[in-house]
Amino acid sequence: MSAPIYRDPVEDGAADPTVIRREGTNEWWMFYTNRRANAGGPGFSWIHGSPIGVAVSRDDGASWTYRGTVKGLDDPADVGQLNTHWAPEVMFADGQYHMFLSYISGVPDGWAVPRTIVQFTSPDLENWTRVGPLALSSDNVIDACVFASPDGLWRLWYKDEGQGSSTWSATSTDMLNWTLEGKVLPGSPEAPPHEGPNVFALGGWYWLIVDEWRGQAAYRSDDTRNWVRQGLIGEVPGSDDMDRRYMRHADVVVVGGHAALYYFTHPLWDEASDKAGPPDAAARRTAVHHARLTVADGVLVLERDIAADMALLAG
């Protein structure tokens, strides 16, 4: 019935989930932005100062257990102060794990601050080595997604907030050195602004979804370079009382002929009446849900109302 599958037990602000299997085990690890939903402070300081939380499932996603937060992700120049970590992209390639982290120094209470995407590597998902920030289209970039494209290149998509909240891409041959490619999806004022790009292959096509703050816009491609818009998914509320809002910032894990989609909601924030943002701690709290994706006749099909304890990650 689309009930939450996970809520952070400390901050109650789990957002921007990404899910990966730990190689050689039956464990699935969920990394997420651990927003400080219960924090005070001015403006939007509660959405900053966030660590990266981790939850683990050993039953193919039927249940999740909190594991703590990721250490060692701060810029060396910022060590000793509270800093902001957002929207981790975590993947396994060439014998090691890679994390692409949206990073902000300190705890700003507004949006007019530099943002960078920083890369890390790890042998085990626990201990991370800083590679460094990526040189991209501006100093206002977040929300990385990486995928192995059919042209033989690794391709990274991200949001450029400084250019109308548009989606851009960069490429690499080795997952370590990145070359800016260009704008992929326009933002405001040409098209709806958006964030949180995610790319995956399913049903014989490549798919790109982005969060338009009214549901996920879905695009289809046969090469990961040229995209055709399909429409919105996740704009219709789920049936559970805690899933009555649109889907926000999602991640997709393909398992055989279907995919598990992980997203978050603000269950108690009425965006229509509180356009300035969540008015109190209760409205700031978030929940992670899962849904099922398939492809029928070349169209991406979302099944949102599924049981919270469904093992969607089983092959």
Image (cartoon, rainbow, N blue to C red):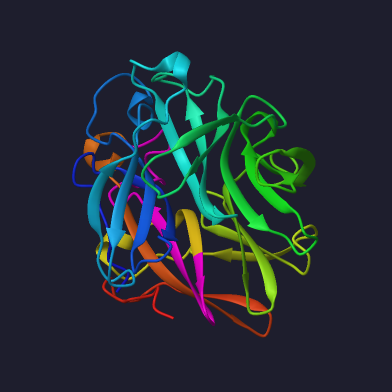
What residue do we see at 27% from left, 49% from top? 268
Compared with residue 310, is residue 125 higher up or lower down, i.e. above or below?
above
Compared with residue 26, is residue 117 higher up or lower down, i.e. above or below?
above
Q: 227 or 122: which is nearer to us?
A: 122
Q: Residue furthest bottom?
A: 297
Q: Is residue 175 magenta?
A: no
What residue do we see at 38% from left, 49% from top? 31
Taking the image as shown, residue 12 lies to the left or right of residue 143, namely left
Q: Quadrant of the N terminus?
A: bottom left
Q: 251 or 210: which is nearer to us?
A: 251
Compared with residue 303, is residue 23 higher up or lower down, i.e. above or below?
above
What residue do we see at 54% from left, 82% from top? 257
Taking the image as shown, residue 290 lies to the left or right of residue 41, namely right
Q: Is residue 271 magenta?
A: yes
Find residue 122 and report its horizontal and vertical position in percent.
Answer: 46, 44
Compared with residue 79, is residue 55 higher up or lower down, i.e. above or below?
below
Q: 91 or 235: which is nearer to us?
A: 91
Which quadrant would residue 37 be assigned to in this image? top left
Find residue 196 and report its horizontal and vertical position in percent.
Answer: 55, 48
Q: Residue furthest left?
A: 9
Taking the image as shown, residue 303 lies to the left or right of residue 210, namely left
Question: What residue range appears in magenta?
Answer: 253-278
Taking the image as shown, residue 55 lies to the left or right of residue 230, namely left
Find residue 7 and report its horizontal and vertical position in percent.
Answer: 25, 52
Would you say residue 246 is visible in this rendering?
no
What residue do we see at 69% from left, 78% from top? 204
Would you say residue 209 is visible in this rendering?
yes
